[in-house]
Amino acid sequence: MKKSIINLITILMAASFVLTATSVTLGGDNTVNAEVRADGSLSETTSRDEPEVYTEADSALNNAAQKLRNAVKNFQSTLTITFDKPCYDKKGDLERRIRDKAFEHTGKPGEGDYLRWTVSFINGSSWYKDDYCKKIQYTIKYNVTKSQDAEAKKKADSILKSLKLDGKKNYDKIQAIYDYITKNVTYYKSSSGNNNITQAMYGPLCKNKAVSRGVVLAIYYMALKEGIDCRIISGSLSGNSYVWNIIKLDGEYYYLDAANDLGEKDYSYFLKCASSLGQYLPDYVYSTDEFKKKYPLATMDYYLKIATPTPTEIPIPTPKKVTYQMSEQKGSITAVAGDKIWLSLPTLPNSSIGWEYTNPAIYKFEDEIAKMAGQTTVTIIYYDASNKDANGKPAETRLSVDITVLYKDVTKESDFWYAPTNYLTAKDVVKGYENQTLFKPGNDCTRAQMLTFMWRLAGSPEPKSDKCQFPDVKSSDYYYKPVIWAVEKGITTGYDDGTFKPGNVCTRAQTVTFLWRMAGKPAPKSATNKFSDVKKTDYFYNATLWASEMNILAGYSDGTFRPQGLCLRRQMVTFLYKYDKFVNNK
């Protein structure tokens, strides 16, 4: 979390619209105290158990909502709605329903969420007689003036025109808008409270400063201007009040939090699914089945779809029998985990037999089965009692064979990850699944796995400290020492919220940067960048150039690096294999 650590008082001031109390007068002295929720609805403190009944109120609601919508568009400070015929409203929430309807998402850039979040304060008082509403009075305040809002809209149109988005795909439009905001807007901080303009679109577009509320308004307005559906979602982030966008792309809605990416050089909060971010908790209205049906949220980050190769189904071979004749000349055999290995032994008279194994967990003669992937040397020792050596001991004959056992799902030599996987497994750098019988090359590589493999490749050095600075890394975790070592080496610093996030998947940019830092941050020899999607301002620019020069990184056939693509295990072992070959052993 980069920009969301804000003084809580400041947040509450910025969200005064959410916390404004509304009074509803019922036939004289009967008053209902309420708070306006983030969606504009009332949270009443009195109990109303009667069934909801509407008659005339339903027919008058649309007209009243249109009047309120127009009043907010024109920045009116007050509005009185008088009903020609008192509206029967037994539940007493007509004022809330009017407000919800007035701020309903229409898909038009200057309506819906734009109006809802441009308002800083709204108070609605209703007059009832019995169960009939006669009049509603609104008092409204705004974060900007009407002229400032008009200037912001004019600026938004100018920016969109300068981005030359006509004819481009929606993804390119979203990225262009996101890039403009994150590179041209500074997050506003003030110990004396928020400046109101930073909470409206005027702040980020006309003054180049904003809080999250101003940022989401700019994203919302410009996306809808380009015909891309977008919403503003309110809730909490790490326990603090917060707002962000969801935006539609290829039929699904993705989280978009430009405020947390302001001034950054990566896309940590761009087109994400909720599960990959984790700490965002939407308000109730955005968590209902009705809302989710209307705005289906993506279950996978967008970059997973466009940047990560689709794993292919790898057939598991049927176990077979591998036979080898032991002889004085040392040989080698290759089998697959689960295969039966039979070592044919020569017959020697007057001899007893002994065995040696460099790794008996992989294979033992008496077990016959290749138990797990890796390499072991098996030696049979013959002791000839009829033939004594100079010390009077039985003469010794040793016959050896090197055995390589493959993972069940890494057996094709033509696969680019075949040699790297088996090489690093033999060095005890990488481990597999299901008792070391499957490697799962198409699985994501997590941050914990990547740093652990790097630590093992470095020789599993003992870190100087025995304490880890990250609260989400425990001493019982297999990656505890690797993470401490990586911090000491300057390979990782963790996230801005103080966590390491071990389960997050490594992006290709992060992976190459980790390796570059492990090598001591060497300066690339060339300034020529062959990747079309790597910019000089990117934090991984030097790392990418260096990795390309060292033949660690090849990129894709279309000339891209795809930095935000998630790193699969098969890609990870290839990076590490090339690092060991071209850096460690150059």
Image (cartoon, helix red, strand yellow):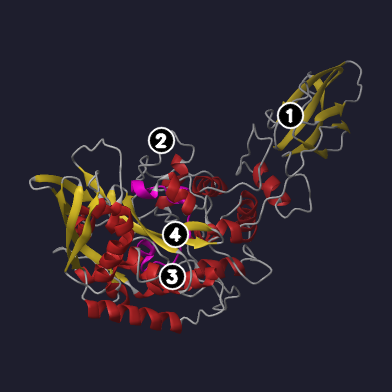
Dot 2: element: loop
Q: Are marks 3 and 4 in contact (CB under 8 Å)?
A: no
Residue at x-position 53% and y-position 68%: 171
Q: Are marks 3 and 1 in contact (CB under 8 Å)?
A: no
Dot 3: element: helix
Q: Are marks 1 and 2 in contact (CB under 8 Å)?
A: no
* Quadrant containing the C terminus in the rendered view: bottom right
Residue 4 location (% of width, % of height): 30, 57
Residue farthest to the left, as pictured: 29
Give me the C-alpha separation between circle 1 and circle 4. Answer: 45 Å
Dot 4: element: loop
Residue at x-position 20% and y-position 52%: 133
Residue where numbered disc 4 is placed: 268
* Quadrant containing the N terminus in the rendered view: bottom left
Q: Amino acid at mark 3?
A: Leu
Residue where numbered disc 3 is placed: 224
* Chain-order first, disc 1 or disc 2: 1
